[in-house]
Amino acid sequence: MPVNVDIMYPQIYEGFLPVSNLYIHMERLLPVCRISDFQIADILNPKKKRTTRFLSGIINFVNFREFRRETYLQLQQSYKSAMEKHQQLETENREAVLKLEKLNTVPVEHQAEVKQLTESIRELEQLLRQDYRRKQTALQEVITQKKSEMAERSRKLNELKVTMATLKEEQEQLKSKIVESPEELKNYKELMKETVKKLKKSKQEVIEKYESYRDLVEVLPACQ
């Protein structure tokens, strides 16, 4: 406590600060040891079972720390080696970039030759592009013509299919007529026979009526 602060009963605060400091550190440590129910009362009024459990958790944590310490040191060493390797690779990469830039730099005595070669390459690329476009146009025309021919052939093929279907249907109809023709002929003959009979019967009836009428006419003068 500051000596220039005038407070009542400073001995109370002098005794509270160590307890408060211990509580703060224990509250941070024990959750790491899987203990989450630590309270200030465990310092002011400690219980045997709770204190034993707290100490057991701390001892287990210390044992675990010692057990994993070697692994941690190995990981730390591996990380350090990896960082050193990374820095080494970055240095080599920077050196390689500088060498590449140096190689890409054309010497003054060869700049004219390089410029001429660059122009020749550009002209050749332009000629190749023009030739490619020309061939592509010609190929597109051929493809269009072939598509048109294929469409025409497809149309004719569809027409032939329709014609074949029509002919097949007519063929089926003709087959049906050919099969049914004898029966129809027989029925037609029977119908004609009946018609002839009816005509003969009608003729006979007419003749009979005529004869009856003739007899009646012949009788009329005698009656006069």
Image (cartoon, helix red, strand yellow):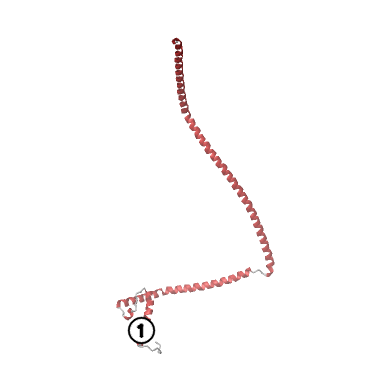
- Amino acid type at image mark 1: Phe
Kindly identify the residue that appears in the image at 63 percent across and 52 percent down.
137
Q: Is residue 80 left or right of residue 124?
A: left
The quarter of the rendered structure image containing the N terminus is: bottom left
Q: Quadrant of residue 117?
A: bottom right
207, above or below 77, in the image: above
Q: Nearer the viewer, residue 19 or 49?
A: 19
Kindly identify the residue that appears in the image at 54 percent across and 40 percent down.
162
99, above or below 142, in the image: below
User: Neighbour class for label 1 at 10 Å: few (<14), some, many (≥20)?
Assistant: few
Kindly identify the residue that appears in the image at 35 percent across and 84 percent down.
16
Q: How many marks?
A: 1
Q: Which residue is mark 1?
A: 16
Residue at the limit of the structure toward the front, as seen here: 224
- Image coords of residue 9 (percent x, y): 35, 88
The quarter of the rendered structure image containing the C terminus is: top left
194, above or below 6, in the image: above
SS of the residue under disc 1: helix
Q: Quadrant of residue 30?
A: bottom left
- Image coords of residue 211 (percent x, y): 45, 15
140, above or below 53, in the image: above
